[in-house]
Image (spheres, grey):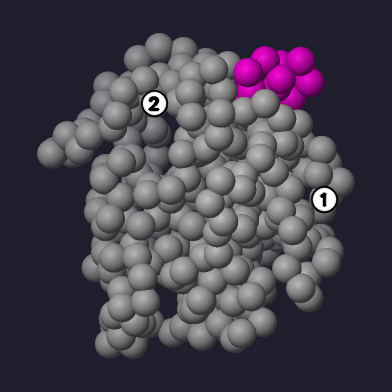
Amino acid sequence: MDIIGLGYMGFEATDLDAWRDYGPAVMGFAIGQNPEGDPDSLYFRMDDRRHRLAFHPGKVDRLAYLGWEAKGRMEFKAACRKFTDAGVDFTVGDAELCEKRGVKELIRFFDPVGFRHELFYGQKWLPDSFVPGRRHGGYLAGRRGLGHVVLMTPEFPPELEDFLINIMGFHWYGSGAGKGKTGFFRSRLNTFTSHDIAYGHAPGRMGIQHVGLFVGSLRDVGETYDIVKKRELQMMMTLGQHSQDPHISFYHFNPSGFAFECIAESEPWHDDGFELNPEKMSVWGHELVGPILGPSVKTPEEVGDPEFKAKKG
């Protein structure tokens, strides 16, 4: 499938007021305009797209959906045919849902472990319209997608890798240097970063572990780092550089209990051409000063999608 990367993400959140302050003041997000028919949610902009992150009122903090961007209408139609031929169950988004997402067309489906995904094309945008919530150099969220996400799953069956590689068309990047079973995957058209999504095996647990966002400069990372420290927000890892990426980043927890990794490129990423097996996760820094799994990772009963649970019986 000709997928660019993550176009948007949606969450259920228990404290939208905390996000309304945190998003602009800490991360530099801009608060977006609510689409008609959805006055209670909170939408954040990271660039000239109508929105990149959506937070909907919920009884528990959890990931609601991941939106993958197809290159265009023809690529979207080809993906739908591939899903049909492979016997993947999906639903077509109606006009109301497409308007909420700000896209031309979309479909919705589940991966084999129960996370909901959407595939779309043609998200609304307006050139030179993004104004950050505070002084900020902006996010690199265009041709690579908005960033990457790491999910924890209670099961890591062969069907998951088959779905991601043979149906979604993702490239297998490797398992990284972490402990346990982990898989990193990159969408077909993304040649700018190592991975768009990763799954970690956490028996009995499920949820979102962190989201990685690329900023315009190292200064953006440093200023966010200072704000996080000044506000005494819980960090996961201090400033550092991973072994497999020429990037500098740090991790801290947001109001929904998962972490944001703020990332600046020290040099452009390039495909190594072989599967890496790093001796350790980072070449310097990234001291673990908080939990590796935040409160957003709970039991499947707490954060699993109700529709998927109903289908599983």
Q: Residue at x 63, y 18 (%)?
A: 223
Callout 1: SS: helix
Which x, y percent locates residue 69? 42, 63
The location of residue 7, given as percent across then percent down, is 49, 57
**Relative to 256, residue 3 above or below:** below
Image location (x, y in percent) of residue 185: 33, 50
Identify the residue position indicated by label 2 in the image.
Answer: 265
Q: Which residues are magenta?
A: 223-237
Indicate which disc residue 169 carries. none
195 is within the stretch colored magenta: no
Residue 16 — which label?
1
Using the rendered view, name the quadrant where residue 55 is placed: bottom right
- Whether the residues at callouts 2 and 1 have beta carbons within 8 Å, the answer is no
Question: Element type at marker 2?
Answer: strand
Q: Is residue 161 left or right of residue 213?
A: left
Q: CA distance from mark 2 to mark 1?
A: 31 Å
Is residue 283 in view?
yes
Q: What's the residue type where badge 1 is placed?
A: Leu
The relative height of residue 232 versus residue 183 in the rendered view (above or below) is: above
* Residue drawn at the location 64% of the way across and 23% of the way down: 224
Residue 73 occupies quadrant: bottom left
Q: Residues within 10 Å of mark 2 (few under 14, many from 20)?
A: some
Q: Which three-letter amino acid code belongs to the residue tagged 2?
A: Glu
* Residue 241, above or below 91: above
Query: Which of these two is toward me, 202 or 112?
Result: 112
Count the labels in the image.
Answer: 2
For the point 67% across and 15% down, the residue is 226
